[in-house]
Image (cartoon, coloured by chain):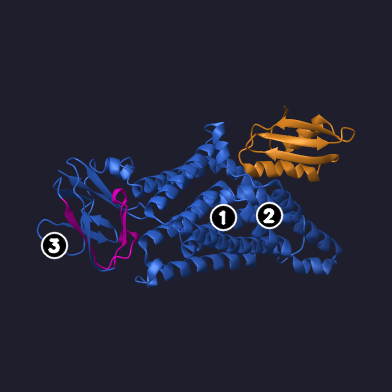
Chain colours: A blue, B orange
Amino acid sequence: MSTKNQKTSVDPVIVVALGVAFVAIAFALAMFQSNPSAGVTSDSGAMWQMVAAFITGVTTGGLSCLAVQGGLLASSLAHQVERDYAEQAAQTRAQRKKSKANPHINVALPIFLFLATKLGAYTLLGALLGLLGSYLTLSPMMRGALMFAIGIFMVGNALRMFNVHPIFRYFSIEPPKFITRYIRKTAKGADTATPIFLGLLTIFIPCGVTQAMMATALGTGSAFMGAALMFAFTLGTSPVFFIVAYLTTELGAKLEKLFMRFVAAVVLILGFVTLDGGLNVLGSPLSFQNLTRDMFPPSRAATSPRVSVPVGELLLQVENGGYFPTTLKAPADKALTLNLVTNQTYSCARDFVIPVLNYYEALPETGTVKVNIPAQPKGSRLFFTCSMGMYTGQIVFE
Amino acid sequence: MIKKTFKIPNMTCSACAMKLEALEDVLDGVQEINASYHKLEMVIEYDESKLTEEQIVAAVKKKGYQAMLA
């Protein structure tokens, strides 16, 4: 009989999977907001990174990952579907009628298992990368150099996606042949363990956006932050991956072509932001913020009450939203004291860096730290920044 | 056995290379396929008595790519 009049039933596994995803997001957001004074989770810079990672996952990561890893899942699912058909063919008519109520459950479950394992695997990978990064980021200068390299990698990958020049193909990491061959052979399995194992193996075939995110996890220099970043990103990719993979893997290929330029544009922007952050931490006058600072007046003022400092000393208010004022003026050829004042400051602005002086200080949440600045020649500028290169400012000597 | 290299100009990422290497499982007479996104090429080792160039090109086309003998 015709099936045109049949109502499309919503697979309960999808409802459960999406429910779990949304509960996880809500839990993560609640965790970030409920405890504004607790270490790393309260850091607005870290929060911004988590949100950006999640949005990147939702908007571009899902489709990009689907293009690279969707084939594996499809291959595994094909065997599952074949098995289901074989089982259905062996069923009696009464059994078939009974099972019609939920015809897709055997397809949805492997996707869910695949994505759940992938989420766990990438979170662990993020922790390992962050841990590795903690050994690489011994100094702000090294962190700046690492951010710069990551930015170059991301921009190169974006230009590869735009197909600007054949040389950019080398920004894509090709997994070793024995790994791809092993994964392909594993994908032929038809048992429940296969999608779980494949989900685990996806860490060896990351898509371009995932590679960029892995590089960012390395740059966090913290196992916790690296894990949280990759968790947020992979969680973001999951709904798109799940829905599109569930509907049809063919759609993935079409969407890949349709959104490839969009994905490239997002990676390019993220790459430039990272590159700019790296330049800031290196103290370069060529960063976007340092080049354009004089063109745009500060858009906001300090919110904490102004404190008095001894005559002749400089005051810099370090707040959650950055440094105020962003430009300080000081007499040339004269050593001076800079007072860094925090007042319930929890953001990465607390990690204060003056790259040229090789000065780094983790400021207290509330308090004052004095910095001795040696005499500087007239007309010179001394740039300062947070350790992530997000918040910046300068001292102009006249 | 014979080894031939095909240029695949429209590969877009390393996943394309994986897709092409999966032809090992579907083409009869193939010994080994090594595809590279960096080089935009596919090296295939196969039994001439079981497989022809035309069949290889057709199989690659079915995967969504163009293949030209290098």
**SS at badge 2:** helix
Chain identifier of the residue bearing label 3 in the image: A
- In front: mark 2 or mark 3? 3
Q: Say if the magenta span includes residue A12.
A: no
Local SS, label 1:
helix
Q: How much space separates mark 1 and mark 2, taking CA atoms?
A: 14 Å
Above/below status of A148 relative to A187:
above
Above or below for A210 versus A163: below
Residue A390 image point, x, y percent: 34, 52
Mark 2 — on which chain does it sit? A
Residue A308 in sight: yes
Distance, label 2 to label 3, CA atoms, is 63 Å
Q: Is residue A2 visible?
A: no
Viewport quadrant of the C terminus of chain A: top left
Report the span colored magenta.
A335-364
Q: Which residue is mark 2?
A: A73
Task: Name the foreground residue: A74 vs A95.
Answer: A74
Question: Residue at the spot x=76%, y=67% of the render?
Answer: A99
Task: Name the residue at 68% across, 54% down.
Answer: A73
Q: Residues within 10 Å of mark 3 (few under 14, many from 20)?
A: few
Q: Which residue is the site of mark 1?
A: A240
Residue A205 screen position, x and y as percent: 63, 50
